[in-house]
Image (spheres, helix red, strand yellow):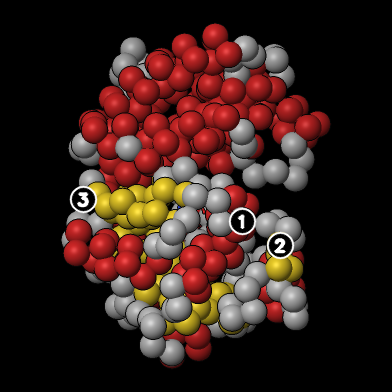
Amino acid sequence: MKKILIIGGGAMGSAFSIPCLENKNQVIITEPYNKTFIKNLASKNKFHSSLKIGLPNKLKFKRYSKNIFKNKFDLIVIALSLAGVDFIGKELKDLKIKTPLLVLTKGLKYDKKKNKLLTISHLLKKNYNASNVSVLKGPCLAKELAKKNKTSVVIASNNIRIAKWIGNLISTKYYLTEYSKDIIGVEICSAIKNIYAMIIGSGQNLNTSSGLFQKSMIEMKYLVKYFKGDEATVLGLSGIGDLYVSAAGGRNSKMGDYLGKGFTFSYAKKKFMPKDTVEGEQLAREIAPYILKKINKKKIPLMYHLLKTIIHNKKI
Ligand SMILES: NC(=O)c1ccc[n+]([C@@H]2O[C@H](COP(=O)([O-])OP(=O)(O)OC[C@H]3O[C@@H](n4cnc5c(N)ncnc54)[C@H](O)[C@@H]3O)[C@@H](O)[C@H]2O)c1
């Protein structure tokens, strides 16, 4: 039995606790930010308002404070959205935490000073001195994992031994883990698929969307290679696997559909999806200053066009 701390009690962090508990680990979840999730997790039946299920009794909830790190954990899981990564990186650095980290968060960060795009593992290592970072990505709708539907994910780490050690801790009959050394490729794919899901969603019919799907794969391959990942990763769970689930249904492809119908992003967001987080939009704003300046437009025409559509609030 190992001790696992999950930071982030949103849909994914909470769903992730289920296979961890099933594998007889002791699991503590904490939520630093969202009052609704704190209320859900602190309640007696732990009914989660996003997942619409009661979480297992064995899941322990602790209010977030620096004191939580006084306990010794075998693994710390980061399940916050991208906006929370700098916050938790700073906390872990200040407290000199050296526990192995597993990042579930998907996204990329733009380092303005250095004019560089950083993956989350790179950011945690370079800016916050984290030394032992693995990432877990792939096609996983939190609600489906919470129902124990069969789900396959990939754990990537520079040290494959650690990736496999984590896999052994968390995998179950319904939560299957693969492994990869291509941490860059896995992180790039799992971030940009949100933008390509919007592009595919804009198609308005299956023929058009399928054509956009195929062109998206070509652009994803180009981008993974550009950032020095392994092109083959695009055909893995974090690439085509995650692109499929995001394009088939989800908030990014839904927004893409509105864009394809001729609405601007701001109008569609306000009118049809006022309460939804559209991760592809957040990522588009984050990476646009880098991508639009540094990468040849002819190599990634779809990405280029979508970034411009979002940042200038234009019709597609
Ligand atoms: N790796 C996987 O298998 C997998 C699967 C699904 C989702 N995800 C990723 O997990 C992350 C969380 O997704 P979710 O579905 O749980 O979202 P959610 O909206 O249900 O939860 C978001 C979490 O981030 C926190 N947060 C939001 N803004 C914050 C801020 N400014 N500062 C600190 N914390 C903040 C919230 O409090 C909450 O804990 C996303 O990056 C998503 O892409 C990963």
Is residue 66 in view? no
Residue found at the far front of this picture: 173
Q: Quadrant of the N terminus?
A: bottom left
Rendering quarter of residue 227:
top left
- Residue to which mark 2 is pinned: 53
- Residue 114 in the image: above or below residue 158: above
Q: Residue at x 32, y 37 (%)?
A: 236
Q: Nearer the viewer, mark 2 or mark 1?
A: 1
* CA–CA distance in space, label 2 to label 3: 35 Å
- Residue to which mark 1 is pinned: 147
* CA–CA distance in space, label 3 to label 1: 30 Å
| Residue 107 image offset from top left, x and y in percent | 44, 46
Residues at marks 2 and 3 touching, judged by CB atoms closer than 8 Å: no
| Residue 38 image offset from top left, x and y in percent | 69, 72
* CA–CA distance in space, label 2 to label 1: 9 Å
Residues at marks 2 and 1 touching, judged by CB atoms closer than 8 Å: yes
Q: Amino acid at mark 3?
A: Lys
- Residue to which mark 3 is pinned: 181
The kind of secondary structure element at disc 1 is loop
Q: Residue at x 65, y 70 (%)?
A: 55
Q: Quadrant of the C terminus?
A: top right
Q: Is residue 10 left or right of residue 4?
A: right
